[in-house]
Structure formats: C-alpha cells, structure tokens
Image (tube, coloured by chain):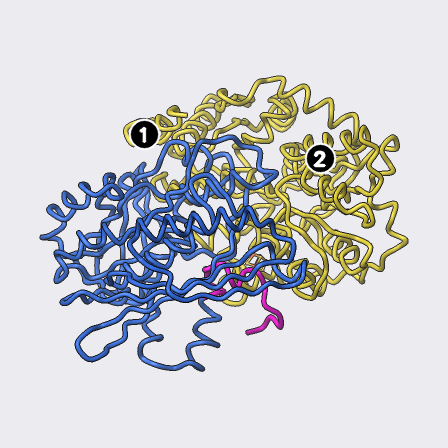
Amino acid sequence: MKEEKILLSHGSGGRLSHDLIKKLFLPNFVNDKLSKLDDGAILKTPGTKLAYSTDSYTVDPLFFPGGNIGLLAVYGTVNDLAMCGAKPLYLSCSLIIEEGFPLSDLEEIVLSMKKACSIARVDIVTGDTKVVNRGNADKIFINTSGIGVVKRGVNTSGSNAQVGDLIILNGPIGNHGIAILSAREGLNFETTIQSDLAPLNGLVNEILKYSSDIHVLRDPTRGGLATTLNEIAQSSRVEVEIEEEKIPLEEEVRAACELLGYDPLYLANEGKLVTFVSPHVAPILLEEMRKNEYGINSKIIGKVVKKSEGLVYLRTSIGGKRVVDMLTGEQLPRIC
Amino acid sequence: MKYIDEYRSKTLAKNILNQINLISYQPVNLMEVCGTHTVSIFRNGLRKILPLHINLISGPGCPVCVTPVRYIDEIIAFSRKKEFIVTTFGDMLRVPGSTSSLEKEKAKGADIRMVYSPLDALKIAQNNPEKKIIFAGVGFETTIPTIASTILKADKEKIKNFFVLSMGKLIPPAMKSLLESKEIKINGFLCPGHVSTIIGSKPYQSIASQYHVPCVISGFEPVDILQSIYLLLQQLKNNQAEVIIQYSRAVKPEGNEIALSKMKEVFITVDSDWRGIGNIPQSGLEINDNFFRFNARALESDIEIEETLEFKNCRCGEVLKGIITPLQCPLFKKICTPENPLGACMVSSEGSCSAYYKYN
Ligand code: SF4
C-alpha cells in the first residue's frame, strides 16, 4: 500500500477497498470462513448451519426519499443474511451518536427500525449506545450484526457460479443511488425517484425452494451491479456477459444518469439481488420471483459464458460490446 | 423523459450505420472534443461497430484533465493554511499536483470539502464566517455561468469570506489551437453538447470557415453520436464545412443568452495554460476588476506555493491533443491506474486515460 493514510476511496466498495481487504484484513484474520468474502460467514454448529453478518451504516442525508438510516441498518443486514441463504433471526444494534443530535430524529430512526424488524421478522436482541463529542462523528452511525439459520441444502456463494448459469435480477437498478443524490444539497435536480430499500428475505425464501440449482445470491449495494458481478466473476473465475437492453432501468433514473454523467451499473441499490441459476430452472424461478412484491420486475439479464480470469462484458443496446470494470473511487457528477 | 429511448434504438443505429458505410470509404480523423462524448462512445461500444477507417480521436474536453499542475499546487497551498476551507468538485481531489494531491492533504487533516456546485461553497462560507472559503473554479462554458451567478449572489448578499480561484476555460480557442499546431490532422469536429447549450453554434463558425473543418454539435446518446458522425462524413463528401446542430433538442444557435451575459459580467478573457498543451491565447477566464474582491489570487501573499514539478513521463499532453491514444503511453495500466493516477487524464471520470482503462 503506497498511500500512507486511509483515503475516502478505501471505503467506497471499489478496488481500493478490495486492496485493503486482500492485503491487510485477510492475511491477518486468516480463516476459511472469512476468506470466502461473501456477504456473511457460514458457521457450522452441531445440527445447524448459522449465517453471521455485520455492517456499519453511515448515510448522508440520514433521511432520504424512500427511507432513512434506521430502515437501512435493519434491511441491510437482513439482506446480507438472506444472501447467505439464511433465514434472518436476530440482530444486534450499536449506535454512535454525536453530541447534540436531535432526540426527535433519534426517535424517528428507532421507530423506523422497529417497523423494519416487524416487517422482516427479526428481533434486535442486544445493543449498545455511545455518544461522542461534537465533531467526532457525523450525526449518527449505526452498526448492526445479524444471525440467521441457513436452510438445509443451500449452498450459495459468490465463488459458486457455473458455466451456463443464467443471471436473474429482481428489478430496476440505481434507484437508491439517485434517491440519495437527489436528497443531497447542491445537486439541482428534481425527481420523484425513491430508494428501492426493501427486505429481501421473503423473496430469497421463494428462490431457495430451488436451492440445489441456485449457485449465487448477492445484493448489488455499494458499487452497484457492475462491482457485484465483477466480484462474482473473479471469485468463481468465470466470464459473465450481460445485455444492456435486458437490465431494468426506470426512465427517471436513466434521465438523471444522463444529466449527471453517471453509469447506472455503478449506482447503489438496497433492495436488489442477483442470482446465478442453472438454466433449466430459470423460467419457472422467474415466474415465482415475479409473484413476490420485490420481484415483480425480475428479468434474466445475462449468463456465464465460460471459465476465465473473471471478466464481465456488456452487450450494448445498439449492438456494441464492452468490458464492465469494478468501480474505482466514487462516481462523481460530470462537470463538462 | 421518454424521448431518450429513440436515441438508443438499435434499428435506428443500424440504419445510420448503413448510411455511414454507403458514403464513407476513406480514412478520416474525427475528434470528439468533449469527455462526455468519449465516455459515451466507450460505454456504448461505438468504436467496435464503426468502420475501421473512421478514426475517433478524443480531444481536450475534460476540464479536470487540462488543469495545470501549478493550479493544483495553488489550491493545495491554500488547503495547508488553517484559515482557509477549500471547496472543490470531487474529480479534483485526486489530481496529482507537484508532490501531493487534495485527497492526500485531506487525509492529513486539511479542511477540504467536496461540493456539487459553487452555491454549496457559498453556503459553507455563510456558515463559517471566521474562515475564508476558496472555491476551486475549474470548468468550461458549462460550469462557468454557475460560478458567475455564485459570485453575483455573494456580491448581492455582501459575503466577504468567499473566494474563487478561477481556472475557467473556453473550448473554441482550444479547438483552433489544435488546428493551428498542425500536429494532427483533424477532418471534422464532434462539438460538445453541454458547452454548446451555453455558447450556441456561432463560436464554431470561424473554425468551419477559416480552417475548412466541418463541425457538428452532438448529443450524447449513441444514436446522436452516430447521426453526428454521418453529418460530418456527408459534409466531407460534399466538400462542405459548416456548423450543424444535431443536438437541436437542447442547443439553440444563439446559446443561452442569460448565462452568457452573467459570464460577461463577472469574467474577462485571458491567455491560459492547459495541462500538457501549454498556453493558449484568450482561452481562459479570470474574474474582472469589478469583482476582484472575490478573486482568491488576491490572497496569494498568504500562502506558499511549491515549485512546480511536472511529471515528465506522463503523456497527457499528447493524449489531450489526440496525437496518441492512452494505449500508446508506456505507463498506461502498468504504473498509471485509476487508484494510482500519474496524470489528470487518469483521474477524471471524463478523462481519456480513465475511459480507456475502464472500457477497453
Ligand atoms: S496513462 Fe497516465 S501517465 Fe500515461 S498519459 Fe495517461 S494519465 Fe499520463
């Protein structure tokens, strides 16, 4: 690592974050569970397999169209557990609050978390609160960890993609990323776009009825669909090809992307998942997924073409073809 | 915003491609001046579907890429002093200066804040009356009117702690300078869509007539770009050199008069340094005497700017002029990557090197 200091890019979920994980965390915390680099760890205990996952949530602004940091903290960890093929059960919740933070905002966040827990059917069973001096944290940070039970016969992992697999996405991408941007000051664009923030454990439950044919389950959050597909392609050492035309995208998100110069493939999602499945179950699975409220717009967006070093290609809507790389740094609005 | 779809239609694209194939058989060099076009060409895989003899050259149209090292050093020098808060567009954070970058200074503790608009910087000034706020005013004709409006607002609201370090640049003089230098043969220009919504089509007129090079102001969707390429080829075939607005849904011949008048009110045209290219006469904008109190250069006695160290091996200059593609730079991808950028063209999302890295 050449840089002497941690830069913001180290936390962006892109290549620098990966470097940090591969060069600092993995070699020091070496064990077979961590090294899979899935959304959570799978722990074998007598009789059951447990999934264990954690995430810290910081978001600016705390309240955004379609959600807030509280909902995000619950659904985010619920979804990470679901992506391990687990039924989420229990969460922990740690709050780091900046001195002076309005109590009414905290109440609103906590009420949202309560609502989210009841929708996702999980309980917050342990927690902690720290208050730090003004200026030592930005308003509020939330960490949640979660435990879930992995269903029998489930064996999904980012390193499990097979040649021939079809890739299903459960709906339009980029809404969360654009919703957050639209709520930030200074970006003068009006939009009605709402975050797609949603608990995906119900949908995953449907998908796992076909568990022997489900090879990968991932939620393309930070870094977007492009980064998630790259992670899967690299862990599974396969070449992935997706088709631009097939990727669901709302008109307004596309328009905002045009305005800002963003690539929707790199925008964050909080209610999306991709699953890599055996081709023969794809049609029926698609039908099942579309019956779930968070899967109505599910689509097959591409396939695993062959074994390779781990590359992702996109067939563009006008017939071109290009590489899709991981996100490096943050996406920034164009200034030209 | 349904209309965008028609500019992404496969059938339409195919039709235009057929027409292009019908009228074009000679090698031509067409320059897309603007970084947003470069990115769109890559994102849509246009190079792969165009006939090989149509050579698309990426031009100097990325404001971050053409910002000289000395300017980055100036901004860094401000950020090193406690009395200043530096505000900047995000793309500038990682551009290498002589020995550091804003991102590195920020990690060391400098108060550097990313903003999406100069108006945010003004707000920061209002909220921090004990500090002086420097806005790094880079940009082309697209961004400059907003900077002008912000200065006018600061003036009206009598804000005393807001300063702009202007690095505004003008596109048409750069295009002329490329043609003058004769380092590369350009047969036609795809002119920037966003810049042209402000300046209109007139500023390109003299390029078309004096140098006999056709210009087409193009939109950013794939069909826009293909259509614009066709319009250039058609002119070349008929030996014409005119300015055509393909992006007529956004660009009017006279441009945006309100924006232009604000620019005029606040700025004067000056000679300006372009990274890697050098000094181009009358290609930059400086705050005029009426608004001198907002000019950060008036505060330069308070700071120490380090000696300029140009990184000799970076070939951004030639890349920006379209003389080489990033693939011909020996450092490309080997040493220079988006995580460890050696030149500005690798930093900015609209820079040619970064586009080649990401999409090629
Ligand atoms: S690849 Fe890097 S070093 Fe080479 S020209 Fe581009 S920015 Fe400069």
Where residue A24 appears, x then y in whole percent? 48, 77
Compute the Cα span from label 1 to label 2: 37 Å
Residue drawn 26% across and 54% down? A201
Task: Give me the disc on residue B147.
Answer: 2
Disc 2: CA contacts within 10 A as few (<14), some (14-19) or many (>=20): many
Q: Please tell me the numbered disc located at residue B9.
A: 1
Quadrant for residue A153, please give it.
bottom left
Q: Residue at (60%, 46%) from the top-left corner?
A: B321
Of the 4 image quadrants, the one containing the N terminus of chain B is top left
Which chain is rendered blue in the image? A
Residue B305: x percent and y percent?
A: 82, 59
Q: Secondary structure at mark 1?
A: loop
Mark 1 and mark 2 lie on one chain; the one further toward the N terminus is 1
Indicate the amino acid at tag 2.
Answer: Ile
Q: Chain of mark 2?
A: B
Compare residues A98 and B191 and report the one nearer the observer: A98
**Horizontal and vertical percent position of residue A42:** 28, 72
Q: Is residue B243 magenta?
A: no
On whether residue A9 falls in the magenta region, the answer is yes
Q: Is residue B97 left or right of residue A92?
A: right
Specify start and end residues of the magenta stretch as a single range: A1-17
Are labels 1 and 2 assigned to the same chain? Answer: yes
Query: Quarter for ligand 1?
Result: bottom right
In the image, which is nearer the foreground, mark 1 or mark 2?
2
